[in-house]
Image: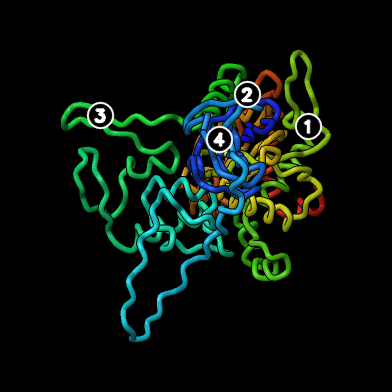
Amino acid sequence: MSLEVRVPALPESVADARVLTWSKRPGEAVREGENLVELETDKVVLEVPAPRAGVLGEILAEEGALVHTDDVLALISEGAASTAAPAPKPAAPVSTAPAATPTPPAAASPLNVPPHVTPSARQLVKELHLEPNQIPGRDGRIQKADVLAYLDAREHQAPERHPDLSGASRTTAAPSSFAAAPLDTAPTPALSGEAGRPEQRVPMTRLRARIAERLLQAQQNAALLTTFNEINLAAVNALRARYKETFEQRHGARLGLMSFFVKAVVEALQRFPVLNAGIDGEDILYHGYYDIGIAVSSPRGLVVPILRNADQLGMAEIEQGIAEFGQKAKDGTLSYEELTGGTFSITNGGVFGSLLSTPILNPPQSAILGLHKIQERPIVEDGQIVIAPMMYLALTYDHRLIDGRDAVQFLVAIKELLEDPARLLLRV
């Protein structure tokens, strides 16, 4: 008798999912609760566990197929639970003592990755033909972030050989853009095109397609306008330098810039509530809470997890929350709930070196704040030219709802709060 493995109930507003990676092949034994397949939605990657032990039978939805809630993915045959072997332990370290050289074990195939490699990491290991036993893990597991860190370390240690677009082998100090493509796409297909003019076509991930859809929606359905200001971060930097060690010792979190900006944004939103509102049909929906989206880069694209009730969080809680979002984004473990909602967003292009940009709204929000690179520049203070750490701020807003006056005064409020951080405490 066979048991059907079905697509679990997808989150609300998610129409379908794409079959990303099968962890087992037909005929292989599976344990109850063991991950069988990953499904990629436009926001998160979902793991589908085996409902019981047995042998994986026919796969009815191959990798790349679109599926919907309750679709049948595969069949599991019962009666072979005892054949499901326990997960192998990580290979023991090789002794350096003089001894007779034993016969080395066969290298693990990328297609048969040990179970202690997480599914999201398994995809990269398989696509890039890596040896899992060479990748340092944490807590007995190898996660996607470990694979990326291994690749980065290997890139900087020595030149590697990468296939160029003509199919020939070449030696470079860094991978080409095509070599890096599997980190954000499906497995690399064959090259095409004329001789000397190669082309490569890869399917767009569900997340990338959703990003494109939402950005286009924002530009088509809102009257976007951006206003700018600049801020002197000398006072904030002085506070961070003075208290960073004590802060980290007491709270176990790094004292970064984002907690200051989140606090200042919440205070400014309380003064100008229209920037925390949204358009709902012919109504304006004012939110009495402050759920701040923090744009985070991940191997699959830009995601915006939400700091819920940011007005009720201390600076340590904000820093811890953002650090957790960053790690989850790298590991591909952000939940759908963490990516849903939000009343206002902050994006920081400065971490990539951007000096100035115009961010795009994250619908149905009505405003987004863009942070940029901190740059030492000469400015005039009290009639004197001084060098100060300056940052450009950019506020993009929906002009259908928000007047220019409110947008400009909102930015001025943030500028005043952070150039004199005592105002955050005194709320003046």
Dot 4 corresponds to which residue?
40
State how far apart marks 4 and 1 are (Cα).
36 Å
Name the amino acid type tagged 3.
Ser
In the image shown, does 73 or 383 lie closer to the viewer?
Answer: 73
Name the amino acid type tagged 2.
Ala
Query: In x, y percent, where is residue 140?
Result: 56, 64
Residue at left 40%, top 51%? 110
Which quadrant holds residue 131?
A: bottom left
Dot 3 or dot 1, earlier in sequence: 3
Disc number lying in front (4 or 1): 4
Dot 3 or dot 4, earlier in sequence: 4
State how far apart marks 2 and 4 are (Cα).
12 Å
Query: In x, y percent, where is residue 154?
Result: 36, 60
State how far apart marks 3 and 2 are (Cα).
33 Å
Answer above or below: position of 239 versus 341: below
Dot 3 corresponds to which residue?
192
Name the amino acid type tagged 4.
Glu
Residue at left 65%, top 68%? 242
Contact? badges 3 and 2 (CB < 8 Å):
no
Dot 1 corresponds to which residue?
273
Disc number lying in front (3 or 1): 3
Answer above or below: position of 108 versus 177: below
Q: Does 252 sit left or right of 187 as displayed? A: right
The numbered mark at residue 157 is none
Query: In x, y percent, where is residue 101?
Result: 31, 78
In the image shown, does 35 or 127 lie closer to the viewer?
Answer: 35
Element marked by disc 1? helix
The numbered mark at residue 15 is 2
